[in-house]
Image (tube, rainbow, N blue to C red):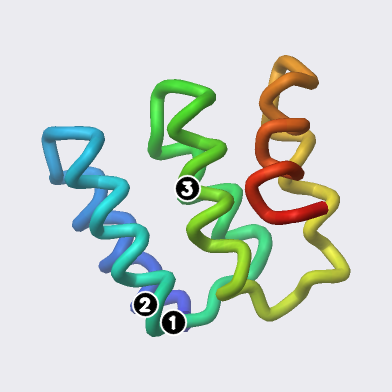
Amino acid sequence: MTNDQFATFVSLVNNTTFRSQKKDIIEIAASSNTFTVAQVIQTMSLMTFSGDKVDVAAAMYHSVCDYNNWYMVYSVFDFEMYARDLRKKIGQ
């Protein structure tokens, strides 16, 4: 996703009130776009709860164009249990 497209995407997610709707928008975008790991991390930061961050990262995993940097996603979590949950969701 280009920087301009990503900025529009972030704005749309930010302007959505309900977290379930935010996750829906992210899942729809992930189904037809590619993202860098940095964009995944930035998208995760739009969510308040760690469990939602896990869901967002899992939804975007198959849309990542730089898998060699995926390890950076795990640093977002304050607790190892969320990183484990993400690894389990994506089959790692």
At x 53% / y 62%, what residue is drawn? Answer: 60
Q: Mark 3 points at which residue?
A: 56
As drawn, the label of residue 33 is: 1
Q: How crowded is mark 3: few (under 14 residues within 10 Å), some or many (20 or more)?
A: many
Q: Name the residue under label 2.
A: 4
Distance in Å between CA atoms under marks 3 and 2: 20 Å
Of the pair 50 and 36, the residue shown nearer to us: 50
The amino acid type found where label 2 is placed reads Asp
Distance in Å between CA atoms under marks 2 and 1: 13 Å
User: Measured along the vertical axis of the image, is residue 86 above or below residue 60?
Assistant: above
Tell which tag, 2 or 1, sits nearer the viewer. Answer: 1
At x 68% / y 54%, what residue is drawn? Answer: 90
User: Measured along the vertical axis of the image, is residue 73 above or below residue 7?
Assistant: above
Q: How crowded is mark 2: few (under 14 residues within 10 Å), some or many (20 or more)?
A: few
Give the structural element (helix, strand or loop) at label 2.
Answer: helix
Label 3 or label 2, whichever comes before in sequence order = 2
Label 1 or label 3, whichever comes before in sequence order = 1
Kindly indicate whether the residue at mark 2 contacts the one at mark 3 (C-beta within 8 angstroms): no
The amino acid type found where label 3 is placed reads Val
